[in-house]
Image: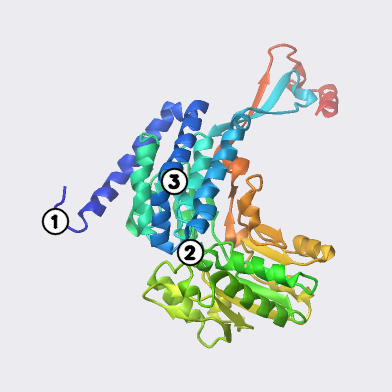
Amino acid sequence: MNTGNPDATATEQISDIEDKVTAIREVFASGYSKEYAWRVEQLKQLELLIHEKQNLLLEALAADLGKCKTEAWISELGFVLSDIKHTLKHLKKWMKPRKTSTPVGAQPGKSYVLPEPLGTVLIIGAWNYPFQLVLAPLVAAIAAGNCAVLKPSELASQMSKLLAELIPEYLDTNAFAVVEGAVDETTELLAQRFDHIFYTGGEAVGRIVMSAAAKHLTPVTLELGGKSPCIVDNTANIDVTAARIVWSKWMNAGQTCVAPDYILVDKSVADQLLVAIEKKIQAFYGESAETSEDYGKIINQRHFQRLGSYLENQNVVFGGGQNVQTGYFEPTLVLNPSLDSELMQQEIFGPILPIITLDSINQAIPFVNQRSKPLALYVYTNNDDYAQKVLHQTSAGNVCVNDGFMFMTNPNLPFGGVGNSGMGSYHGRSGFDRLSHLKTVMERSFKFDVSLRYPPFSKLKLSMLKRIL
């Protein structure tokens, strides 16, 4: 009921959050979300949602982020559909007990690991991929037999509103709920007891989430970000390298957690790479990306102004154009920025790409290792020995050799961060395992109850036990 108070709706929703979470926890306790048939039905309903409402979803992504249909389909809708298809194909196998050997001292008996659902999961999505980063974790939660509360990002307001409408229409309303809102709603959600919290976003909020979870000893998955380096040595195919860098950097106008954050390039090919990148930007988005239907926009004015501040006193060698009214921020290249500048201290999360030239590509590894561990690392080289050197002497959540974030397309690869870039991984079976408790089970017979382990002990018993154990 509209009371005339502009905060009434939000207040009512906040006051309802505890009851909503409690109700869903009670539903999980009833046990029916554990059934294979229920999990399959919910996954198929998600699949149906995407197929039947794809036009509405694409419109919301265009309104929030200026995403073109092709990019939105590939990186959001199609990504989740692929995840669902893979999960449905393998779910029955994932759910089965996983047999393992049993030591001589525990014979006769059998040992296995039994996956079981954790319970009720809180999924806090991010604004840059507001559909994928809510629904992909939900696929894992459903597959593992959990119930869930979803908190879409309020910054992607059109998608948040749409998910709040569509999720109850397609999924089991007893087991799933969507909570819209901003800081107050999220704070209230974090005050509740969940069995797992899955958060995608920035490091600062990640610390808040982890602190809140600690009060209930709730496990967390944090998918954060960081400054993902892109190393280019003098053996790389520069034309292909440039195309793949431009594709992975300026998708979603650079607002991607695994986008290349800066380039480290051997100075002998730096000019060649710079020219090639400029040509690929123009080939992909035209003479002016502002008129391109394939180039997105910055999510809001706060982030727009943040990005603009990064260019102060920088050597901008390409781009830099801005239109705050439309959210357009031109693909921008900065050459050799100060390493102490905000541009090189903060995750950029936008369409600015610093290029740092190195006297020797061997300087790249210590450069990366002197900084926080990134969510992704890219190395472009035709030198297999150097590629292996980078792989084994650096640490990153995910690595791709000679391409952008193509590892995201393989559901058999876990995706996640390390150190400040996050903890825990998901996608495919790794997501199922992440949102399951892998319960240890040993079953034994009453037969052959050997007395060696029982007191009173003796030297003979000890000698025999040493041989068995």
The residue identified by callout 2 is: 204
Choose the circle earlier in sequence order: 1 or 2: 1
Look at 39% across and 69% down and name the residue there. 300
Q: Which of marks 2 and 3 is nearer the N terminus?
A: 3
- State which tag comes first along the sequence, 1 or 3: 1
**CB atoms of marks 1 and 3 within 8 Å:** no
Please state the total of marks drawn on the protein image: 3
Foreground disc of the pair 1, 3? 1
In the foreground, 78 or 456: 78
> Could you tell me the amino acid type at mark 1?
Gly
**Residue contact between numbered discs 2 and 3, judged by CB atoms under 8 Å:** no
Query: Taking the image as drawn, is residue 188 in sight?
Result: no
Q: Which mark is residue 303?
A: none
Residue nearer the viewer, 374 or 165: 165
Q: Quarter holding the C terminus?
A: top right
Where residue 317 sits, quadrant-wise, is bottom right
Disc sitting over residue 4 in the figure: 1
* Amino acid carrying mark 2 in the image: Ala
Looking at the image, residue 126 lies above or below residue 304: above
